[in-house]
Amino acid sequence: MARRSTSGRAGQGTWWAGLPGLAYLVALVLAPLVIIVIFSFLSRAKLGVGVKWEFTVQPYVELFYSESLSGERSFDPTYLQIFFNSVVYSLITALVCLVLSIPIALWIATRPPKWRTLLVFLVTIPFWTSLLIRTYAFVIILNDNGPINGALTGLGILSEPIPMLYTPFATIVGLVYSFLPFMILPIYASAERFDFRLAEAAYDLGATKGRVLMRIVLPAVRPGIIAGLILVFIPALGSFLAPELLGGGKTSMIANVIAAQFGASRNWPFGAALSVMVLVIVMLALVAFAVVARRSSRRGSQQSLESLL
Amino acid sequence: MKSPRGTGTSLKNFPLFGPVAAIVFGFLYIPLVFVVGYSFNSNRVVTVWKGFSLEWYADVLTNDDIQRAVINSLRVASISTVLSVIFATGLAIGLLRMARAGKTAAWSLIMAPLVIPEIVFAIGTLALFVQIRFPLGVDAITLAHTAFCIPFALLPIRARLRSVDLAVYEAAADLGANEWVIFRRITLPLLAPGIVAGALLAFIISLDDFIVSYFLAGAGGTTLPVYIFGMIRNAITPGVNALSTLLLLVSVVIVTVSYIIARRKR
Amino acid sequence: MAATEASALSIRNVSKAFPTPEGGEVKALDDVSLDVADGSFMVLLGPSGCGKTTLLRCIAGLESPDSGEIDLKGTRIDDVPVWKRRVNTVFQSYALFPHMTVTQNVAFGLQMDKLPKGEIAQKVDRSLELVRLTGLGGRRPSQLSGGQQQRVALARALAKEPEVLLLDEPLSALDLKLRRGMQLELKRLQQETHITFVLVTHDQDEAMSMGDRVAVFNEGRIVQVGEPREVYLRPRTRFVADFIGEANIVDVITEGGGAAITGWGAIPGESWAADSPAIGDGRRVAAVRPEDVMLTAGGDGRFPIIDATFIGGDLHAVVQVGDMTLAARQPAADATGLSTGGRCDVAFRAGSLRIVED
């Protein structure tokens, strides 16, 4: 046995080098997730902080029903509506990102190689800056006194500013801005590997630019598109800052409701149940995308992550 | 204009893609320009320009609360950087030697913080710490940041490790080096650029984090982003912009350095 | 095998199998035995995937054999870890440490032996001088040409003064011109240092020009060992005949006491090599080199010429004989009248046919 152990791998280290890291991740990534699931089946603590160790499915009931003071249960779509809104906002975000990303990703992919690296770097920089500050930027821009309204009223196009901040529009703009690089990079990664001689061959066979784009180029970057859709949809769904700062009170998303349960509302089990629902939606989304993409998307998303770094 | 005959490059271009790309680049950067620009506004109302002034910088840099937040942020970021880089280096080496099934499981665990919405991760960690009675504050934030900094530290280290010719380790063993000597004299020096790049990325990811810090801050753990969030909530002044500009500057400088290091000598 | 000669390296019944991705096993080495004389230059020759590199890695200690024994100067080493073996390797990719200078690369192995600093410096200088790289000690591997990197790899391994130096396809990354030069250089180094060299290659010219002895591998086994000339002149198997140089393999049948080639006729006794194995009964195969196939032109020749091409000063011809084609090569001067589509007669040079194992 000892003979085989070093066979063909002299000096390359051992698998147990990864054990401390894995143990840490079990303690600080896996354990929190497990705790969330456990908490979602427990009762509210009297003081609101933490939970009371009594099994109940009440938190999940609260998702659909509200209880009046007299104890009567009635169907209440408030939270379902918020879930629905969150999914819709995230889908719109993903689609807007897609439309914006295809041209820029393909444009970068067709630049000379030394320019490409720089342009990709320029796309990644915003990703590495604080999400809080990037969201705050739109608080300024979409303000009634902000540069957009200022310019429009100053030029006499508008008589008074259009309210943009604290609307669903503001939330979606903020989400698009937050996650746009996640769409551009995977599409670029696919496009960069695309052999543009195939496009030349298509032109040679008489195809027009539009047809080459639709029939040759876009199918080739499909793995990137699918990876990008996941990479934008998932974090958008769990967004806290954009709806909080740009949507005002009017356009809460799930994350804001969850945060409220651990803050002012002091209902941890319900917050945990909402989180479990988010995880379920995320997993469903992952499975759905995986089915659509088979293996190509997984490879694509990993490559796109690696291209980020 | 390009000739209608078209060379290889012009055939590659699609109409309007260039202008759209320019607009998207504008969309990515102009908001940040506004943040920076208004930080020099002497008016209290951010978006109404009155005149150039550095007073807000002086204002925020002398604020005691902000100084405390900066110290908290730097402490959290440095410690979680060191921890995550150590774990990530071990993981990079371990992943290379793991059997296929183990690798897949390990990889999903490592990447989980990138896939799970941050809010869920934040409240899960909060619940965990409250449950085991670990006090909230700077240390709690540090432990949580370490976990989600690991994937960011890991990717450049792993990329570097995978670019090394495996025969180099064999050559070292062949010349008489045992496993430990190989790690110290061959593996670590070869990984160094990846480790530095990974450390820089982990540092800004921790420095910029808001949500996890917000939930784990407790009474004394206010970090800079948590403080800025409070400022935005209360009253927006160009002071927010001044602080934001400084934080942006740090991020951009660090990511640029990391990028240069990672690309060198590939 | 005569044990009178001192063996540097003795390999006894070594086998090694690797698992395949499909869950099966592939035998890389199948009961291989080999002796390498002290101070000699042994070449392991064979096509890729034949096991020669696996054997080299087993000697180095980078792989462990499943069974069998490897002795170095009479001491068993197959259970000694790689870093303790007095054997060093020049890797196919050179495997220079990219973060160290040339001097540091060469010194590395000596530092592992914990030699005093002064001695290390001395040995590094001597090794670099030996491979003619004096003055380049301060450079990084990335600042060197492929040929220079190759020399650093050699110097690094030679500095340790190993009992045996293993070279894994060391010249395969060099261009043709450099390769010729390095072949001579390696031969010179081996003769100057008196270190036993074991070199792996798939290039028969390399094997022929460098080796004192050649071991020909096929499918995990050694099919023939001998001096290069001997292996070329007296191939034992169809594989060796075909792999080293060119050979026509013809089917031979016994016919009423004599031997015959179907479609050609009875083989005259003088065509056989004097030491060719006996034909015995039944079907056998024989090898004959193209230069030993003699064609004579004539409109009434028995055999059609499928192709005749002049390359350099030689005519390369392919002739249809019965069901088979024979390749022939002869000086242009003797080739008048031979052209594609023509006809000719075929004869075999005296002493040129040899029965080989199929």
Image (cartoon, coloured by chain):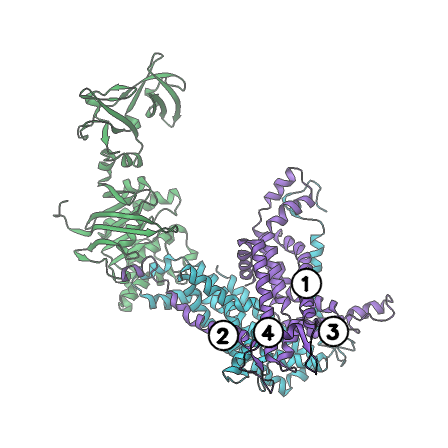
**Chain depicted in cyan:** B
Single out the mark in the foreground, 1 or 4: 4
Residue assigned mark 2 = A31
In which quadrant is the N terminus of chain C drawn? top left
Q: Earlier in the sequence, mark 4 or mark 2?
A: 2
**Chain depicted in purple:** A
Q: Amino acid at mark 2?
A: Ala
Task: Please give the chain letter of the residue carrying mark 1.
Answer: A
Task: Tell me how far mark 1 sits from mark 4, CA to CA.
Answer: 25 Å
Q: Amino acid at mark 1?
A: Thr
Task: Please give the chain letter of the residue carrying mark 4.
Answer: A
Q: Amino acid at mark 3?
A: Lys
Can residue B139 be seen here? The reply is no
Residue assigned mark 3 = A250
Q: Earlier in the sequence, mark 3 or mark 4?
A: 3
Check if mark 1 and mark 4 are on a common chain.
Answer: yes
Question: Foreground residue, A266 or A128?
Answer: A266
Check if mark 3 and mark 4 are on a common chain.
Answer: yes
Residue assigned mark 1 = A93
Q: Are marks 1 and 2 in contact (CB under 8 Å)?
A: no
Mark 2 lies on a secondary structure that is helix
Q: Earlier in the sequence, mark 1 or mark 3?
A: 1
Is B16 displayed left or right of C341 in the figure?
right
Q: Is residue B1 above or below residue A162?
A: above
Q: Which colour denotes chain C?
A: green
Task: Tell me how far mark 3 sits from mark 4, CA to CA.
Answer: 22 Å
Q: x and y percent of residue B73 in the render?
A: 57, 80
Check if mark 1 and mark 2 are on a common chain.
Answer: yes
